[in-house]
Image: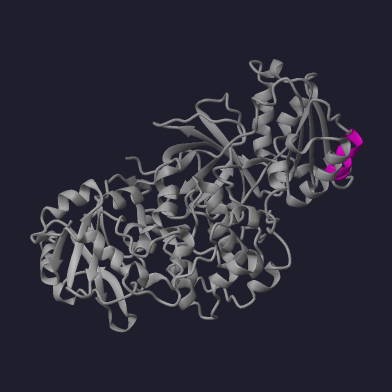
């Protein structure tokens, strides 16, 4: 455990940029503060509750090449994954690994594109000091401080203006050696000091068993109204740190082209529409139900984890103000 | 580590129209360098570079080792490109994917296979598997009920004739409406099933066909006394990856491409009604 001044910490990140691409929170024009590859280290900011988008797109890009082909032959080439460091991740967001790792790595077969990206990334988690009104991470037993998460984690102490930094993995232990600053003996004290900052975050589920609750409500009246505001724009799925659905598409022609995968959304009507015209989820009702059940029922049945981390992005970005917290409350 | 999205190469050995409306073509594809083995009921992602890939059930028997067959309806971009293939062309293939008919659990049982329209492909694979000299003794009586709108739309006509001549399989072929020259059964598959009335005793029913056929055949089987876990079907969904990653084909918590496509009705009835 170490404590560093902001300039120590930035210097550390700058040194890392020799061998890694550093991705850090920066002010992006009108978009607020978001994770982005760093070109000017003075632009890194730590003054935010959470980044506009989660880090998901750096290990599972919105559009990703599966392979290239030329003259009806697949071009055999090993895509070398980029080494990257992502700094400033919140604990809610990094809990998306429970869903993404299960889908892409733990469940056979291993998706090598995802695994390569994940293995070549160093994750640095920053403890939340403040929270938004839309935060509900505690519902999923996620601690907003999260100093046990990531390869490295840090807590910024407002008072001393110092970063308290801790290594949580082997990768992190190696890395923290490069950080030139003082050791921190008062790490735990500092963490304790900020615990009460998050007393206002709700735990909507407490000890209730969602599998039991939803297994009796796969159909029924409650589903008849909750979807009605939804315009199927899909923004909730694109902002979601855990959503992983993708489409596979062709670019180019057989003489030169590539096959790519692009994020897709179960909220779109064509998502499940078959060539015959038959659509097993024909209306908003079924599509919205599928999203809710995947997050709070199917995923629990898969690997006993929630499909939601309580980051609140789907609430703050929904154009029709649908609030997933209210949906949860409707059913429990 | 292996990139699971890269298909292996196969060569078109034969292709011909299977039905009189010239909408379904059967393709026989030869393995080139890499090979795989499969079980009846499994499917593949058939890939045409520059057009895309789509899932199809394997129609040939697992005993045929150096090639596999598909019967494919022309409907969209990929299937149109497949219909345009010529002998000698190279295509991509990922497979075998998904689970398969419970051929081991079915041992020592009677089996009634009920099929409709062009969903008969993996059923053909299953029947050919059970009829093979190596396995025929594992199964008791085998009955096949197979229907199509008209005689020209029945798949694998030569094979159907062969089965009719054998004494170790009972066949009931039917068409929706009587036409001149047709001397077999006339009537919808559910009705014919009711008439044939297979005994549920120690018997598996394997049902595969259009949703409407399944919808009306299921009550018939239940009435005859078939237990729900011995009524087996193969489901379809729009699929992309075929390996349980892309999320698209879920029915409840199951991914049809990986946990299926073969399910029994006691599994299906516990899921949201989204078939």
Residue A9: give x, y in percent of width and height. Answer: 14, 66
Residue placed most toward the observer, B12 or A295: A295
Residue B161: give x, y in percent of width and height. Answer: 76, 28
* Residue drawn where x is 56% and y is 45% of the image: B257
| Image position of B196 with respect to B176: above or below | above
Q: Residue furthest bottom?
A: A30
Residue placed most toward the observer, A309 or A282: A309
Residue placed most toward the observer, B270 or A326: A326
* Residue drawn where x is 51% and y is 29% of the image: B37
Residue A42: give x, y in percent of width and height. Answer: 14, 76
Residue range (magenta): B183-196
Q: Quadrant of residue B234?
A: top right
Query: In this figure, which colouring scheme has been used for the structure?
Result: one colour
Task: Say whether residue B262 is visible.
Answer: yes
Relative to B65, A57 lies left or right? left
Query: Is B188 contained in the magenta span?
Result: yes
| Image position of B152 with respect to A56: above or below | above
Image quadrant where one finds the N terminus of chain B: top left
Residue placed most toward the observer, A105 or A254: A105
Q: How many marks?
A: 0
Relative to A266, A191 lies left or right? left
């Amino acid at each position: 455990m170490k404590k560093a001044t902001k300039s120590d910490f930035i210097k550390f990140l700058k040194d890392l940029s020799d061998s890694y691409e550093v991705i850090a929170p920066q002010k992006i024009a009108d978009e607020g503060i978001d994770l982005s590859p760093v070109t000017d280290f003075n632009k890194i900011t730590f003054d935010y509750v959470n980044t506009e988008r989660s880090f998901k797109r750096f290990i599972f890009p919105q559009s990703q090449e599966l392979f290239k082909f030329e003259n009806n032959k697949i071009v055999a080439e090993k895509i070398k994954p980029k080494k990257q460091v992502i700094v400033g991740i919140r604990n809610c967001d990094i809990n998306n690994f429970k869903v993404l790792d299960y889908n892409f790595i733990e469940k056979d077969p291993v998706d090598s594109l995802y695994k390569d990206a994940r293995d070549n990334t160093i994750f640095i988690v920053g403890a939340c000091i403040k929270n938004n009104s839309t935060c509900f991470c505690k519902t999923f037993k996620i601690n907003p401080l999260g100093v046990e998460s990531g390869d490295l984690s840090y807590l910024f102490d407002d008072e001393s203006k110092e970063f308290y930094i801790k290594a949580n993995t082997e990768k992190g232990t190696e890395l923290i050696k490069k950080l030139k600053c003082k050791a921190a003996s008062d790490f735990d004290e500092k963490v304790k000091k900020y615990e009460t900052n998050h007393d206002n975050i709700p735990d909507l589920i407490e000890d209730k068993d969602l599998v039991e609750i939803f297994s009796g409500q796969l159909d029924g009246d409650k589903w008849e109204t909750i979807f009605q505001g939804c315009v199927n724009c899909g923004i909730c799925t694109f902002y979601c740190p855990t959503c992983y659905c993708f489409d596979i598409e062709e670019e180019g022609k057989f003489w030169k082209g590539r096959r790519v995968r692009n994020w897709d959304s179960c909220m779109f009507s064509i998502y499940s529409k078959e060539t015959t015209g038959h659509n097993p989820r024909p209306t908003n009702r079924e599509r919205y139900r599928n999203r809710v059940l995947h997050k709070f029922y199917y995923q629990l049945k898969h690997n006993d984890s929630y499909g939601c981390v309580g980051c609140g992005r789907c609430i703050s970005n929904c154009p029709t103000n649908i609030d997933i917290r209210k949906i949860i409350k409707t059913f429990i | 580590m292996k990139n699971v999205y890269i298909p292996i190469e196969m060569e078109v050995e034969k292709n011909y129209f299977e039905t009189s409306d010239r909408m379904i073509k059967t393709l026989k594809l030869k393995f080139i360098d890499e090979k795989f083995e499969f079980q009846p009921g499994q499917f593949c992602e058939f890939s045409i570079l520059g057009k895309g890939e789509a899932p199809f059930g394997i129609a040939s028997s697992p005993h045929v080792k150096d090639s596999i067959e598909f019967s494919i309806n022309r409907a969209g971009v990929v299937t149109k490109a497949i219909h345009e293939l010529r002998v000698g062309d190279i295509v991509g293939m990922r497979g075998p994917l998904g689970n398969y008919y419970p051929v081991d659990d079915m041992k020592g049982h009677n089996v009634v296979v009920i099929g409709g329209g062009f969903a008969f492909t993996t059923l053909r694979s299953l029947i050919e598997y059970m009829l093979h000299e190596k396995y025929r003794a594992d199964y008791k009586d085998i009955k096949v009920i197979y229907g199509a709108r008209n005689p020209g739309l029945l798949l694998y006509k030569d094979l159907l004739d062969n089965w009719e001549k054998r004494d170790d399989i009972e066949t009931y072929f039917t068409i929706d409406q009587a036409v001149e020259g047709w001397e077999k059964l006339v009537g919808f598959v559910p009705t014919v099933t009711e008439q044939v009335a297979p005994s549920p005793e120690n018997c598996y029913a394997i049902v595969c066909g259009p949703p409407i056929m399944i919808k009306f055949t299921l009550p018939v089987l239940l009435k005859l006394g078939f237990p729900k876990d011995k009524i087996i079907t193969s489901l379809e969904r729009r699929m992309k990856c075929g390996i349980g990653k892309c999320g698209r084909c879920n029915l409840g918590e199951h991914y049809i491409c990986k946990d299926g496509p073969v399910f029994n009705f006691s599994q299906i009835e516990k899921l949201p009604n989204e078939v």
